[in-house]
Image (spheres, rainbow, N blue to C red):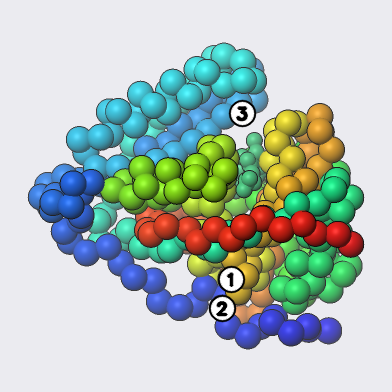
Amino acid sequence: MLLDGFGKGGHGCQPLAFVGLTIRCAAGSFCPMNDEWYSVRMRASRDGRHLSGAERIGQSPEVAGLVSLLTARAMAHAGGTPDDVRCTLEKLEVGAIASLSFPEVRTWQVEDWRCGRLLAVQLLIGAGLCAEVAGFCLQALANGPAPGGGPMRGAMIVDALSGERLDSDAARGVRVSHMDVSPEERTDVVAGLRQVGLSHYRVLEALILSGKVLQAPGLVAELCWSDDPDYLTGYVATPANGYQRISCLKERGSFCGGRVFLVDSRNWSRDAFVTFLEKTPVLLHGMPLVHPSEEWEP
Ligand code: WAQ
Ligand code: MG
C-alpha cells in the first residue's frame, strides 16, 4: 500500500544544472580554462581492512595540496596507522560536473537511540514506506548488513515498496563518490555550519554525500548512521524534507552503522542509479539552510 508522497515526483528526475566553461574562483575572478578539474580520492587500510577514506574535487593548482591533506588525514586516523594508503587523481570533464544545492537541514534532539529509531521509522513512513520496510532497514543497520554481520563498505539499496534488497554486492554495496562542496564556497560553508554548532567534519561530509544521493534517479529516502562507536547522530534524508538529523540513533560503543538507499524500483535502472552515484562528478553550491534544532518525543 503506497502512502502519500511516494511515487509523486521529487525522485531526482529534474534536470541538473551543469557548471559552465568558466568557473568562479575564490576571489571572484575567473579561472582560465586550462585550470583542469580533478577528483582526488584517498583510501587507507591495514592488514587488508579498510581504515579510512575521503575525497575532494579541485582544480590543478590545488591538487597537490589536496593529496597532502588527505594523506595527513589517513596517517592521523584514530583507528591506527595504515600500512597501505592510495591516492587516486582523476581528471574530470568540466562540462560533466553537475552543480547541485545542499539539502535543508533539520536536527531532532531525542532522549536515546530507542527514541531516535522510532523517529527514523516515522520519517521513513512519511516518505511513503510501510512500517515493515522501515523497520527492516533499521534492523539491517543495527545487525550489520554485510555477510557475516558488521558494516558494509558502501550502502545497501532497498526497494522502498517491497523491502527487497537490490544491491548486487552485499559486502561492498554502492559507494557514492566524485562529490564535494564547490571549492570557492567551502570556507563560507564550513564557517556557516560552525556558526550553528555543526563543526564536526562528519556533518559536512554527510551533507555532501546526501546532497548527491537525493538527486539519484529513483531515490525515495536515505537512512544513515556512522559505524564510529562514538558518533551517535544519524539522519533520514528525503527529496521533499531534506536532511533530518537525529541526535542519537545508536548506543555509544557500538560499531554498527551504515547507509540504506531506498528506491522506487518501478521504471528504475540500477545501472543508471549506481553510475550516477559512483561516477558522475558533483559540486554542491550555496549555503545549506539550517533550521534550529527541536526536541522530539514519541
Ligand atoms: N558511499 C556509500 N556508503 C558509504 C560511504 C560512501 N561513500 N561512506 C560510508 N558509507 C557507509 C558505510 O556502510 C559506513 O559504514 C557507513 O556509511 C557510515 O559511514 O549530520 O560519519 O563515514 O551529524 O561512519 C551522519 C551524521 C554521519 C552526520 C555518518 O558515516 C551529522 C558517518 P561513516
Ligand atoms: Mg566510518
Q: Is residue 166 visible?
A: no
Location of residue 240 in the rendering, given as x and y in whole percent from the top left corner: 60, 74
Give the residue at mark 2: 10
**Which of the pair 32/186 is nearer the observer?**
186
**In this rendering, would 287 be left or right of 270?**
left
Residue sitting at x 23%, y 46%: 26
Question: Rounded to the nearest whole Å, what is the CA distance between mark 3 and mark 1?
Answer: 31 Å
Instruction: In this rendered view, identify the residue nearer to me: 110 or 182.
Output: 110
The quadrant of the image that shows the C terminus is bottom right
Tell me the distance, in whole angstroms, between the alpha carbons under discs 2 and 3: 35 Å
In the displayed structure image, the side of residue 219 where residue 139 appears, left or right: right
Residue drawn at 71 percent across, 73 percent down: 127
Counting residues from the start of the chain, the first of labels 2 and 3 encountered is: 2
> In screen coordinates, is 20 left or right of 230?
left
In the rendered image, the quadrant that contains the N terminus is bottom right
Cβ at disc 2 under 8 Å from ligand 1 = no
Q: How many marks?
A: 3
The reply to whether dot 1 and dot 2 touch (C-beta < 8 Å) is: yes
Quadrant in the rendering for residue 171: top right
Disc 3 or disc 1, which is closer to the eye?
1
Q: Is residue 209 left or right of residue 256?
A: left
The numbered dot on residue 239 is: 1
What amino acid is labelled 1 in the image? Pro
The picture places residue 76, in percent across and down from the top left corner, at 52, 18
Dot 1: few (<14), some (14–19), or many (≥20) neighbours within 10 Å?
A: many
- Viewer-closest of 130 and 121: 121
List the residue tagged with mark 3: 50
The residues tagged by marks 1 and 2 sit, at their Cα atoms, a distance apart of 6 Å
